[in-house]
Image (tube, helix red, strand yellow):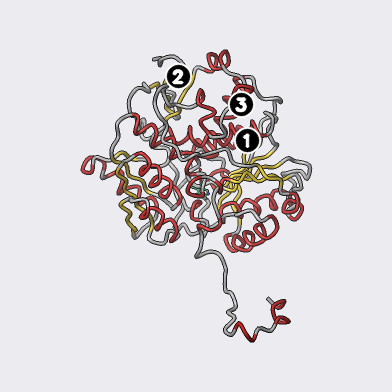
Amino acid sequence: MTCRENCYVTHLESAIDGTKLPHDRIQTLHEGRPLWVRYDLDAIKANLTPATIFQREPTLWRYRELLPLPPGAMPVSLGEGMTPVLPAVRLGETIGAPHLWIKDESQLPTGSFKSRGLCMAITMAKHFGVKRVAIPTAGNAGGAMAAYAARAGMEAFVFMPKDTPVINQAECALAGAKTFLVNGLINDCGAIVRNGVDTMNWFDLSTLKEPYRIEGKKTMGLELAEQFGYDLPDVIVYPTGGGTGLIGMWKAFNELRKLGWLQTATMPKMVAVQSDGCAPIPRAFDAGERFATPWENAATCASGLRVPGAVGDFMILDAIRESGGWAVAVEEDKIVSAMQHAVKTEGISICPEAAACTLAIEKLRSDNRMKRSDRVVLFNTGAASKYLETIPRDLPIIDDPSAIDYAKLFAR
Ligand SMILES: *Cc1c(COP(=O)(O)O)cnc(C)c1O
């Protein structure tokens, strides 16, 4: 199966058993498991160099040869990618990892890295003629989908747990998605979408249930590699829910290695971080299992991490193990203060999920799994301001501005 000129996708491939499927039509899961998009990397290698990419517009579409959109088809775009890699030495010093960078995904459209995946999924859905989409979400995926669906002129349905952050609820509604608050967890929302496919005639955009969100998230890895001059960092610390980001980055690094673009043979250690309020991946990692048992009574303020059972669990665990990395559960009770500490130390809009990553680094440093000299990249997957309910802000009120007592201001 080949495309027209300049499209390098060769086929889709089942992540569980390697079954090949054609990519010229819409696909979902294969026997309940996700699909990889495969490319003719030899042809890409012959026709593309890092120098060519370097000259292109700073959006994720600069990697178009490594993305699934056929030539001539228009992306549905809000100007997503490239995000800055910010040195965070001061924060790094406080957690034992001074060679720390933060890749700040909070600066993407809709304030989270979910725009990378949904940009690609909506672009491909539109390409295949889909008119109606639906998604179960812990928050940010719904917001991103609503925005890209609006941009594409598609009808959108969003199902979220009723305690999803209020900003996520608002952004979905504002972008015109038919948004529903569900008395249950994201898995319950997922069942609503899955069971409604025939009746509602919508396309299910759940994490990993179509092959293209991974390709969008993959651009985090492509960008990071480019920003590091193709000399990848030693450790990548990533807050993991459904796992698309971690899986996508690992795929990106492997594709870059096959292209011969990486400067060193060593690959980064991938670290998946979850809260001990919902830690199916660390539990399976520690037990040496390839699949994760769903977590009971999942609870965490880091809503992006509240995924009790991920359809791509084995893909996450495979990537961590292949990379020589770890899965780490951090203490839920420490996340909010870690968030305050990170934001006030660096000024970066650190979300609770990324704050959990700072705690994970501390942990990996304290038991010496990570070295002080390691070059570490932490992914700030979303903007702090989307978590209004979580941010402590009990501010004093000045009742009478004409009687202000300046001496008292320091007490605050
Ligand atoms: C969705 C989300 C995550 C988890 O991402 P996955 O790639 O699905 O594991 C982490 N942080 C934030 C802010 C999110 O919205």
Q: Dot 2 corresponds to which residue?
A: 7
300 to the left or right of 192 = right
Residue 224, disc: 1
Q: Which residue is drawn at the image coordinates 43% and 58% (left, top)?
A: 164
Q: Dot 3 corresponds to which residue?
A: 55
184 to the left or right of 347 = left
Residue 144, disc: none
Residue 198: name its quadrant: top left
Relative to 45, residue 113 above or below: below
Point out the image quarter for the C terminus. Answer: bottom right
Q: Sequence order check: which comes first, mark 2 or mark 3? A: 2
What SS does tag 3 mark? loop
Mark closer to the observer (3, 1): 3
Tell me the amino acid under the disc marked 1: Leu
The image position of residue 155, as x and y in percent, is 29, 44
Q: Which residue is drawn at the image coordinates 55% and 64% (left, top)?
A: 391
